[in-house]
Each structure stands twice: as C-alpha cells, then as structure tokens.
C-alpha cells in the first residue's frame, strides 16, 4: 500500500470538514429517512442512530482534531546498532486494510474512517442497515474529499452486504484484509470471531460494575452511580451492576436512599437475594446469567458483597472487561482493586462514563478494545499502526 505524505492526508481532512458543513442539510435529511424507517423497540439503538446539528459539529471536530495530530506512521520506536554493525530500526507502519463492523451510529462512519486514513490504512465500513441512508450520505462526503485531492475512493468505502454475504467475505475476502474490528454486542463479536480468517480486535460489550466499599463517601457513591447509569444509557461505558459492601454504616438506610434516588431517574431496579431482604419490593433475579448481561437501558442490578475480594471475584467472572469502578476513601484498597480487576479501564471515585477516547485525552476513537493484544482501551490514532523492522547492513551474513 502506498504511503501518503502527511500534507496530502491533512489536505483530505481539511476538505472533509468543509464538505461536512456544506452538506449538513443533506446529512440531516438522510438521517431523517433512517429514523422514520426504524421499526425496532431498542431505545439505545435508536438513540445511537440520531444525527442532529450537534452530532455533525462533533463529526467536524473529530476530523479537525485528527488533522492536527501528528502522523503516527514512520515513528521510530527503537534504533540500535549490533556488534556485527547491523543497524536495526523499529518503526510504526500501517496495518493495511481495516474492516470495521458496527451497528447504528453513523458518527462511526466519520470517526473510524478519519483515524484509519490518517494512519495510512484503507478502511471498509460495514454499518447496520438501520443507518443506511445516513452512512451513504457520509460516504459521499468522504469520496468527494478524496477525489478533490486526487485520491481513489477505495481508501474509504461502505460495504453493502447482508449477513450471509458478510460471512462469506470474512471466510474468503475478495481483497486483502489485515484487521477486523467488530463494534457491537456479544452476538456480533462471536459472529466475526467464528468466521474471520485474519486478526480480530474486539471492541467488547460493556456490562460495567461499580463496587461501593465500606470506606466509601456515600454521597460521592450515589452521585457517581447516578451519572454512570443515567447519563447515556446507550453508551458501552454505562453502568449495569452495583456491588455494595454489607458492612457500610447504616446499610439498610443507605440502600433505601439509593433506591429512592434511582427511582427519581426512572431506573428499573433488580436485586440479588441478599439485597431483596431489604429492598423487598424490587424484582429479585432468578437466574445468575443476568450478571453477564449488558442492559443498555435504564436498568440496574444491585448486589451485596462481604468485602473487596468478593467484589473483585464477581467482576472478573461476569463483567465485559470494559470498565469497573470502586468508591472508597482508602487509597490502598483502591489500588488493590484497580490492580486486580481485569478490565480495560479501572476507576477510583469516578464514573465509568469517562471510558471514551475524547474524555481520556486520546481524541477520536475507532472503538474501545477489550482485547489484550494489540492494544486495550480507546483505539485512537496512535493505536491504528503496527510496527516494522528496517535492518541496514553492509554485506553481513549469519554464521550459526
């Protein structure tokens, strides 16, 4: 794949910001078609589908932000000269062609493409059928920006495949494919991992947990729980499960206080058997399988634990390995929690809603990776490259 000069890539992105602004009305019109055609009852999916003026402003800001970031390609990672005078230089290099599969969110068509392109990768965008008109409008903007700068439309393009065709493509790609990023629920991820024949970087489900320690500031705990649960229910960084230490002072009273506060936000509560003895009016879970579930709704499961170790064990067994938080005023306890919980992001006295490229200082993100290879957490510009060794010699041969 040809390496593009940074100035050319930035010129495409500058053109894109202008084209998005010029085509604002057309993008909104296309999105209106998608919203009117939406037949499902999934509120989170519908929320992610919406494009308004603020979303377009955010798209423009994402492109502008990436344009101003340093080019991640060709950076020197290491440089050493060996005893045999071979000069070994390790540098960053593009992946090649990336396929991202995602549901709903048309803004992914902008954020994923801008990051992949700036990192000198081609990108194939497999959006959901529910966002087809929005995605086509945004693809036209990309193609206009590319062609204005003398580049092929092949750098960024949508794939229009049904489930069967997608399965066939994953098994036997009709073109080189170097990396697949499935961005969606457990079913989508399993589908891709089952059928893909190249590297897969999983952007996992949320199902995020928060543990309230016996050493917690209760007011702080309530504020964080409310924010993490209600700020944006469609976010993969939203809160689903709360574990409360039974040794908290005034435990019964505080549970009832939390219940009343959540009811103000119309949050549906589920409780485990132990908590049901106090919150007896709430629905008690009948099947432990629900601990694995990502709700994407105004729903919260509250469970009781005896201490830190039990909380860590439950989180590591059931969570989506995305984000987890502890509320405590004991810094040593917080450190133990953060070191032992197996998640991409761990928090002390803060909302899980901050697991986001922009919020964490990474900038625009392709996804939140819950894998451990090649990167974990927000996949920003600097994470969309691999590495390559350049070895310079003067006729050296190896003697075993």
Image (spheres, helix red, strand yellow):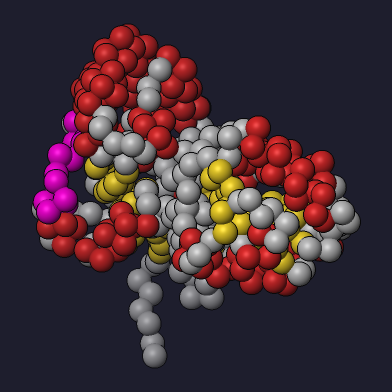
Instruction: Say if 24 sits above or below 197 in the image.
Output: above
Considering depth in this image, is 297 or 61 the residue closer to the camera?
297
- Whether residue 134 sits left or right of residue 50 in the image: it is left
Residue 54 on image: x %, y %: 47, 17
Nearest the eye: 77 or 58: 58
Rendered residue at 84%/63% (across/down)? 247
* Nearer to us in this view, 303 or 240: 303
Query: Who's the residue at 82% across and 49% down the image?
Result: 253
398 to the left or right of 221: left
**What residue is rendered at 66% in x and 39% in y?**
262
Q: Is residue 179 visible?
A: no
Q: Quadrant of residue 188?
A: bottom left
Can residue 83 be seen from the camera position used here? yes
> What is the number of callouts on the image?
0
Query: What residue is at 48 percent from the left and 35 percent from the top?
Result: 364
Image quadrant where residue 138 sits: top left
Q: Residue furthest front?
A: 281
Q: Give, as a single range, the part of the protein colored magenta.
A: 153-166
Q: Quadrant of residue 171?
A: bottom left
Q: In the rendered view, does 213 fall on the left or right side of 181?
A: right
- Residue 178 picture location, percent across and down: 27, 56
Picture coordinates of residue 359, whole percent (x, y)? 60, 36
Image quadrant holding the C terminus, namely: bottom left
Q: Is residue 160 magenta?
A: yes
Question: Percent position (x, y) of residue 228?
Answer: 62, 41
Vertical comparison of 337 with 8: above or below = below
């Amino acid at each position: 794949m040809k390496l593009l000069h940074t100035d050319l890539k930035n010129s495409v992105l500058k053109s894109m910001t202008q084209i998005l602004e010029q085509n604002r009305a057309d993008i909104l019109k296309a999105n209106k078609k998608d919203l009117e055609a939406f037949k499902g009852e999934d509120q989170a999916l519908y929320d992610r589908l919406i494009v308004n003026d603020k979303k377009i402003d955010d798209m423009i800001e994402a492109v502008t932000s990436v344009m101003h970031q340093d080019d991640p390609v060709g950076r020197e990672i290491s440089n050493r000269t060996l005893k045999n005078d071979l000069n070994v230089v390790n540098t960053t290099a593009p992946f090649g062609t990336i396929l991202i599969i995602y549901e709903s969110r048309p803004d992914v068509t902008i954020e994923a493409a801008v990051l992949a392109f700036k990192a000198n990768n081609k990108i194939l965008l497999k959006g959901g059928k529910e966002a087809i008109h929005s995605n086509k409008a945004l693809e036209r903007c990309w193609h206009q920006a590319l062609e204005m700068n003398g580049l092929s439309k092949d750098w960024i393009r949508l794939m229009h495949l049904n489930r069967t065709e997608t399965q066939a493509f994953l098994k036997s790609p009709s073109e080189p494919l170097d990396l697949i990023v499935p961005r969606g629920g457990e079913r989508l991820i399993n589908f891709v991992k089952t059928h893909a024949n190249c590297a897969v970087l999983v952007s996992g489900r949320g199902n995020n947990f928060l543990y309230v320690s016996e050493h917690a500031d209760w007011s702080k705990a309530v504020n964080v729980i409310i924010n993490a649960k209600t700020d944006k229910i469609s976010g993969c960084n939203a809160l689903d499960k709360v574990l409360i230490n039974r040794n908290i002072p005034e435990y019964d009273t505080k549970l009832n206080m939390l219940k009343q506060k959540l009811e103000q936000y119309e949050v549906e509560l589920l409780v485990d058997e132990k908590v049901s003895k106090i919150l007896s009016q709430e629905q008690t879970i009948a099947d432990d399988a629900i601990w694995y579930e990502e709700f994407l709704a105004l729903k919260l499961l509250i469970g009781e634990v005896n201490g830190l170790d039990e909380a860590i064990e439950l989180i590591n067994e059931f969570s989506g390995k995305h984000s987890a938080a502890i509320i405590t005023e004991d810094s040593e306890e917080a450190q133990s929690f953060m070191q032992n919980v197996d998640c991409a992001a761990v928090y002390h006295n803060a909302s899980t809603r901050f697991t986001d490229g922009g919020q964490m200082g990474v900038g625009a993100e392709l996804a939140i990776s819950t894998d451990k290879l090649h990167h974990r957490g927000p996949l920003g510009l600097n994470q969309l490259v691999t590495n390559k060794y350049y070895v310079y010699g003067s006729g050296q041969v190896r003697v075993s």
